[in-house]
Image (tube, rainbow, N blue to C red):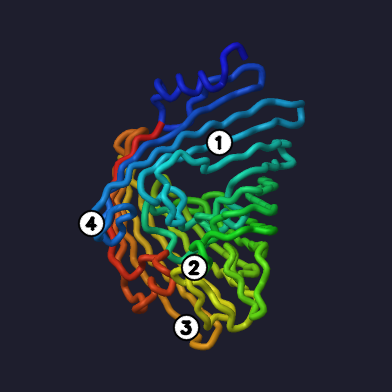
Amino acid sequence: MKKSLLALAVAAVAVASTAQAATVYDKDGTSLSVYGRVQSVIYNGDKSSSAAYNDNSMDTSARLGLDMRTQLAPWVAGFGKVEWEAANGDKGEGNGKDADDFNGRYLWVGFDFGQFGSVKFGKFEDAIKYAISPTDIFEDFGCVGQLGNDDRRSGQMMYEWSGYGVDVKLSASTASDNQQVDGAYFAKDKEILDINTGFAASVGYTSPDVLFGPIGIRAGYSYAQFQQDDELKADGTNIGRSGTYDDYNQYAVALSWGNTGSGFYTAALYQKREFNLYKDGTFFVVDDKPATGIDDYSVQGVEFVLRYSFANGMAVFGGYQWQNIDMDGVDNPDVDASAINLEFDYQITPNFKVWTEARWDVDTDEGYDSITRGVTQYEEDCYSIGARYTF
């Protein structure tokens, strides 16, 4: 290659005019594609991610990605991917941290063995992401009932195979610090833990079209064990990053019918993530101070969505979402959150999209958001208005 890939990528960003990845180099079995987007979204005060005093706010973010591939032998190809995100406010990684930066969102390299599947290594969600994704169709306020949609983690390995309508994904996690763990509300750093090891598996089947589209069923399981690098005190407490978190088990099953991009689509999901702590009645950390009362706890949820996409680029969709937190301990809290979502999209051109979305609280228990230490905002009604340019 006489010109550097980086120079080609920069040139492609300047001239790309298609809504999908633009192939900027393709010769002798080696290719490079570039894609990206930039968007601005206005949020009301109850979902403001960066403004103080519950004022309305605008978040602007951008993504840039590179897909790379080269033929190593007649039976195997090497591939790589990197996707960066730049954002203002705290929406970038979904963990409440300041994301006013340029961060690696996805990073991987792998081998494609054709009909025998592929394997990749790097930063991405584990295999259960495939099982929970059918209901993840909203721009801003979806995924009330599920955990794992934000769990992009380093140190991952995944094998993937597809054929005869069947999809299989198997993943494993190596030790990695400072990782996103949805539902770990009581960690010293909310939803941030150190992974020691983990594995996940998912399988799905997609039928040929039945009336307005294919019928799909997916199921998945995920497990993660956390590091305990800090020495436990005599009473069993530990206020390191992983605190007294031991591990979790997660189960998920989803059904879908149709295609999200055309005509009618509907899907339903059930998932449950069970967290195990080290000691019965042990403490957790709230505002950097220990508190007692929890043994173990689970976060489970249900999601149901309906969508209709018109031929002119417009789409309307909505859904019902429910989440439950059940804690074993002295007070045995068992609380529910329920919400209804509604969204309208207009894909004006293949490159430009606008949308508006709203989420209404329908019967969330008082104090739910306090129990999650502010990670959730399900007790509040939220709306957003956004515009996105994609290349």
Q: Is residue 265 visible to the viewer in this orientation of the structure?
A: yes
Disc 4 is placed on an element classified as loop
Q: If you read the primary sequence from the N terminus, does the residue marked by circle 4 or circle 3 appear first?
A: 4
Query: Mark 3 near mark 2, Cβ–Cβ under 8 Å?
Result: no
Q: If you read the primary sequence from the N terminus, does the residue marked by circle 2 or circle 4 appear first?
A: 4
Q: Amino acid at mark 1?
A: Val
Query: Mark 1 near mark 2, Cβ–Cβ under 8 Å?
Result: no
Spatial CA distance of label 3 from label 2 is 14 Å
Label placed on residue 185 = 2
For residue 39, above or below residue 95: above
Spatial CA distance of label 1 from label 4 is 35 Å
Q: If you read the primary sequence from the N terminus, does the residue marked by circle 3 or circle 2 appear first?
A: 2
Spatial CA distance of label 4 from label 3 is 32 Å
Q: If you read the primary sequence from the N terminus, does the residue marked by circle 1 or circle 3 appear first?
A: 1
For residue 2, above or below residue 127: above
Q: Amino acid at mark 4?
A: Asp
Q: Amino acid at mark 3?
A: Pro
Local crowd at mark 1 within 10 Å, few (<14), some, or many (≥20)? some
Q: Nearer the viewer, mark 4 or mark 3?
A: 4
Disc 1 is placed on an element classified as strand
Residue beneath the point at 56% across and 25% down: 32
